[in-house]
Image: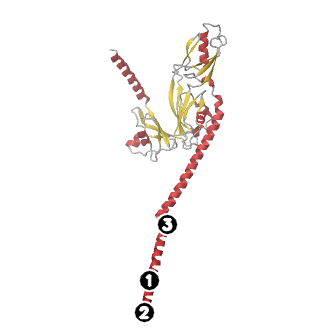
Amino acid sequence: MQAVRYDGFRIMSRTIRARWLALLVVSLAALAGCASPGGERSDAATAGSIAAEAQARAEQSRVMELNRQLTMAASTQSSNLSTHDYRLGPGDVIKIEAPQAPEINSLSVRITGPGTVNLPLVEELRLGGLTTAQAEQLLMQRLSKYIHSPQVAIFITEYASQEVTVTGAVANPGVYPMQRPRTLFEVLSLAGGLAPNAGSTVSVRTGVLDPETGQVATHNLIVDLRDLVKDPSAQALALRGGDSVYVPEAGVFFVEGAVGKPGSYPLRPDMTVLKAIAVAGGTDWTSVEKNVRVIRHDGTGSPRELPVDLVAVRDLGAEDMSLQDGDVVVVDTNYAKKGAVVMWNQALRVLSLGILYQ
């Protein structure tokens, strides 16, 4: 019986030892799992999250500092822009002071859609597109038929016709009235400043007067705000009614010049000059593909121009240039070809008119 009990004890001891051994194996496996590649992945994810948070804070700090500089520039540069450059238009309300003409003295009138007003004595008067000084001169000329040396003063009581549009990554996108020309800094301040996700480069569409023809031509400008706040001549960039400002989000590039679809595009990690031009619809037949430039603003001074030979990149396997946030790709235009296009279009127009009236 003792032997049996001994043998049972021995068997029982082996069972207990086996169970403890299994428990030890499971514990070691669990510890090994904590130190496995899955744990490394968890550490990597944590590190990546910390890096992303640090980058987000740096971006927020960049935009806050840029907004501060824009606000300071707007407050110091707005005083020199004159209200006399404001041009009357539909919806504006003017008040006329003409002491020698009681019929219209102290009269307030709204300019109609065609840009005209109807007044006693002078009847219809076209004021749209005129400054207040020009409108005063025109009204005095019309009154001079009835009054000797009339005196006239015109005041704008409601501004409605001249507006600027601000879109993109700003606090309050919208359309804002322009009571006078305003700097780009003031316009961005009207829109509440840059949004946290805004880039440093903005697109401005503005009208520029051609001194030779007297016509207003539309120009698309790419402006790096970091360079502009450091430029004492930034006051020269004044916006007027009809202009527009687009603030893209950070991570954008621009393509301008002789391409199918000029404009701004989101920046992907693998974006190069050749791919950027393809995204913009490719070059047109007036382009000079050997004269492509990348204008890069790095915030340290004047923008740099980096030449790119698109023919060598595409046909000869030359190294393509990677783009950075805010880069502007400019494809030069062969103006001789462009002139030929204009002449051809005019010839077609004349020909079509001749066929129409035969």
Give the label on residue 34, or none. 3
Q: Is residue 123 visible?
A: yes
Quarter of the image holding residue 4? bottom left
Q: Secondary structure at mark 1?
A: helix
- Separation of marks 2 and 3 at Cα, in angstroms: 49 Å
Mark 3 crowd level (few <14, some 14–19, many ≥20, 10 Å Cα): few
Q: Are marks 2 and 1 in contact (CB under 8 Å)?
A: no
Q: Is residue 329 visible?
A: no
Mark 1 crowd level (few <14, some 14–19, many ≥20, 10 Å Cα): few
- Separation of marks 2 and 1 at Cα, in angstroms: 20 Å
Residue 286 located left or right of residue 47:
left
- Separation of marks 3 and 1 at Cα, in angstroms: 30 Å
Residue on which the image places disc 2: 1
Residue on which the image places disc 1: 14
Of badges 3 and 1, the one in the foreground is 1
Q: Position of residue 94 (x, y in %)?
A: 61, 20
Quarter of the figure that contains the C terminus: top left
Q: Count how many numbered circles sit on residues in the image.
A: 3
Q: Earlier in the sequence, mark 2 or mark 3?
A: 2
Q: Position of residue 198 (x, y in %)?
A: 54, 42
Quarter of the figure that contains the N terminus: bottom left
Amino acid carrying mark 1 in the image: Arg
Q: Earlier in the sequence, mark 2 or mark 1?
A: 2
Q: Position of residue 18 (x, y in %)?
A: 44, 79
Amino acid carrying mark 2 in the image: Met
Q: Residue furthest right?
A: 99
Q: Residue at x 45, y 38 (%)?
A: 292
Q: Earlier in the sequence, mark 3 or mark 1?
A: 1
Quarter of the image holding residue 140? top right
Amino acid carrying mark 3 in the image: Cys
Q: Secondary structure at mark 3?
A: helix
